[in-house]
Image: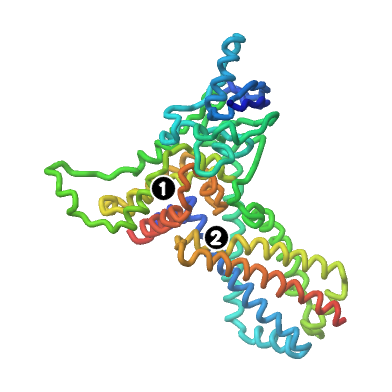
Amino acid sequence: MTKTINLTLKVWRQNGPKNKGRFDTYHAENISTDMSFLEMLDVVNDQLTIDGKEPIAFDHDCREGICGQCGCVVNGRPHGAEKGTTLCQLHMRHFDNGDTIAIEPFRAMAFNVIKDLAVDRSALDKIIQAGGYVSVNTGGAQDANAILVPQEVADLAMDAAQCIGCGACVASCPNASAMLFTSAKVSQLALLPQGKPEAAKRAINMVRTMDELGFGNCSNERECEAECPKEISITNIARLNREYFKAGFFS
Amino acid sequence: MNWITSTLGSSIGKKLLMAITGFSFCGFLAAHLAGNLTIYGGKDAFNGYAEHLHALGPLLTVAELVLLSFFLVHVITGLILYLQNLKARPVRYAVNKTAGGRTFGSATMPYTGALLLAFIVFHLLNFSFVDKTNTTIFNIVSSAFSSPVYVVIYILAMVVAAVHVSHGFWSTFQTVGANHPKYMPLIQTVGIAFAVVVGIGFGFLPIYIFLLA
């Protein structure tokens, strides 16, 4: 038999980017503990719709933890308190009957609330556009194994490439810094031979863009690493620092 | 020259400035502590250390000027970072909870920094910018620490310094890019150990002099 719980939700409601927001209280009744957090919000929204009220807007897409679209701050923790999971992978069995849950959008100057819990994170896209690519000339494709990459290096690049760009690092950072995101995007390319030719330009342009967008400064608080649903390590930030100094002082 | 200002003016550049100046202060603390420990050798040993130090003449002046410029860079950059970081999140969270990344030291850096700034001014007024004719540094120090208020202020200041250093030490390595899974645990342990040595090493001196008087 399915266990059900009743919850009190304090949800951030904001009509638009320019509007003032507020917390509204909702009661979520008979929530199956097998539901994900987003399914719980769906149930609440169904009831709001039936009652003729405006449903809560929140970001979601794949609902299997790989797209990076979902994410709210649940009781002060981006994606909730579970380690290494996104909000859609957070299940209601981690909550107790009668709990009060505060749900807020990711907050940073570089992120804008579109409506309620839906947040515009296109600032992260702008950082990618500034250098998160490799330029490949046209011509015949070369043999797949022509460029040798040590397995450990490929693994490190893959670890960095796990970043889904959800913005939880920015949301959890006490300084709203995007260093973990930027460092993952720089690392996945800088580690591999294909990324080397543009490494210096990439590091400088991506950091410059990150600064211009109004993200805060990293002060090694390590909250990002602890909160990241893909458990990206701050050793990537150290690598970004190296890449940046190399580019700034020696290129 | 433009490349220097654009490199050092960025978020990572400012981090580097904080790291290099801050780590230099760790070196200064170690040297200062080593010198102060001569107090345990008695009055003459301590006065002798002070004399030897001042005998360095211009070298000492150069060292002081370097310290002062590093100090200004550290304070001004720190202030800029603090204000920029406040601005980076205009709407605060209603519920704040740590995921376990930050430590007491890392979370209080700007505040322990401000307290240390006030303490350094106080400390220099006490022992540096005083009339030293017809007296010795030992006499000045022992008369200051005959007051329990001074003893308490200095001990508290050293606790603050230890907390500041506990985050600053390992942070320097992370900032310059020296984060390697083989060495980082050791660096973090050394950082904590250094913070404890600073706290206890300096903090016990006022108690010792107070008990001596």
**Residue B86 vs residue A134, the one in the foreground:** A134
The chosen color scheme is rainbow
User: Toward the viewer: B163 or B15?
Assistant: B163
> Looking at the image, which residue is at 82% across and 70% down?
B151
**Secondary structure under badge 2?**
helix
Residue bearing mark 2: B171
Outermost residue, left side: A140
Q: Which image quarter holds the N terminus of chain B? A: bottom left
Q: Position of residue B80 (x, y in %)?
A: 58, 50
Q: Left of A40 or right of it: where is B204?
A: right
**Farthest front residue in view:** A1
Residue at mark 1: chain:
A
- Say which residue appears at 87% left-offset and 70% top-offset: B148
Which label number is shown at residue A184? 1
> Do the CB atoms of the residues marked 1 and 2 lie less than 8 Å apart?
no
Q: Position of residue A193 (x, y in %)?
A: 26, 54
Tag 1, which secondary structure? helix
Of B19 and A165, nearer the camera is A165
Q: Amino acid at mark 2?
A: Ser
Q: Is residue B47 visible?
A: no
Q: Quadrant where the C terminus of chain B lies?
A: bottom right
* Whole-number angstrom distance, CA of label 1 to CA of label 2: 19 Å
Q: Given the image, what chain letter belongs to the residue carrying mark 2?
A: B
Point 32% across, 58% down: residue: A251
Q: Are marks 1 and 2 on the same chain?
A: no
**How packed is label 1: few (under 14 Cα within 10 Å), some, or many (20 or more)?**
many
Whether residue B53 sits left or right of residue B140 in the image: it is left
Residue at x 64% of width, y 36% of height: A75
Residue A163, how many percent across, how many down?
42, 43
- Name the residue type under label 1: Ala
